[in-house]
Image (cartoon, rainbow, N blue to C red):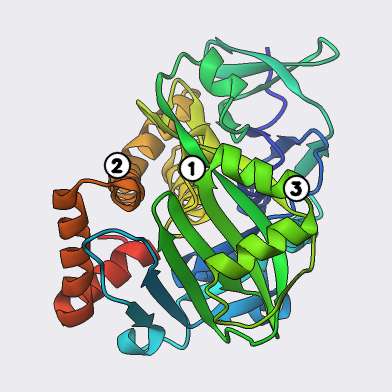
Amino acid sequence: MSQDADIIVVGGGLTGVAAAVSLAGAGLATIHLAPAAPPDRRTSALMIPSVDFLCETGLIVDPAGIGHALTAIRIIDATPRLIHAPETLFDAQEVGLPAFGWNFSNAKLLERFQAAAPATGLETRNQAVTAWRRDGALGVVTLGDGSELRAPLIVGADGKKSLVRAAAGIATREHQFAEAALVCDLELARPIGGASIEFHYPHGPFTLVPAGGKRANLVWIDEEPLLRQTQAAGPEALLAALHQRSQRLFGAITLASPSFVFPLSSLTVATAGRDGVALVGESAHAFPPIGAQGLNLGLRDVADLLAAVNAADRSNPSWGDLASVDYAQRRAGDLARTGGMVDTLFRSLLADMLPSQALRAGGLWALKLVPPLRRQAFALGMGERT
């Protein structure tokens, strides 16, 4: 059987679109299977290395045209615990940068990614995949209408419940948290400038991310029943909770969008690629929204996927198999390092035992006072390669 494309990308989220457009832009005949999905009302804080990658690949042109600069991170320990961490401020100027990154609307990012698609080499279909199998040197995906498509490399960008991953038999380790995240847009009486403000509470952070002017994007992590009850009680009850959680530091708050509640879970894979399958984005990793790592990690997936494909000898009929293994090796260290960091940080925020509180407070004191540790924390949070 002949192949229908060099690469088939399954999944229409931001990472899937970035992968499909980037691969097609690099000269690979690419089919993108992207079923229609509801609008993504969330935002993503992308660190400078991720923004640089988007600009280098042409996925965006001018970050200032669609995003808002993140120049500082302010952490406030708002827990009633016996041992408090100090208030800590990380300023991008400390590492010689005008900003750590940019805060983008996911919907605007998607529009720009789609607009960057090359005129030739990329075919996008509004179709779902129902099965995957390997046929010699080719991966075969079955579509909803029963038809099949073949390519040496299949990219699974189809989310936490990835059909491609499951069909390829790649094992996962998953954990469902009791906490969830409430997100919405807010209008503040006093602007927060370029600083992301994190109030740390016993069940997670209450974070305000700058969105231009007096607007901020809220990510409030807490026990799921509490968030859903607060949301269900109506706008007045929600605003009362928001004023209390923000300690009224920014004056009166008004809602600028509907609120949405998302359950939180983590997911890791035994390998990010094998047998001509490469997993990117939430097909390969999922974490609570801590430390702005989700989409940043997904874009690093795409960067390493491009590198693995470009390094492959595509005259070899088995190049898809070889590229998937190369990709997995490239991603292994970053996935382990970032996953460990996010998991440790999130669990430390939830820890009630005094030794854990002391370690966390001591850690923030060290980050506040010891420049080498601050620089190391900057590098890890920014996703810089080691």
* Residue beneath the point at 57% across and 18% down: 138
Q: Give the residue number, with chain letter if any, for mark 3.
A: 233
Amino acid type at image mark 3: Ala
Query: Residue 345 versus residue 147: which sits nearer the camera?
Result: 345
Classify mark 3: residues with Cα within 10 Å, few (<14), some (14-19) or many (20+).
few
Amino acid type at image mark 2: Ala
Residue 246 can be seen in this image: yes
Q: Give the residue number, with chain letter if any, for mark 2.
A: 336
Nearest to N terminus: mark 1 or mark 3:
3
Q: Give the residue number, with chain letter if any, for mark 1.
A: 309
Q: In whole angstroms, how far apart are the C-alphas of marks 1 and 3?
A: 51 Å
Query: Residue 124 versus residue 359: which sits nearer the camera?
Result: 359
Q: Residue 385 at what x, y percent from top left?
A: 31, 60
- Residue 139, quarter of the rendered image: top right
Residue at disc 3, secondary structure: loop
Amino acid type at image mark 1: Val
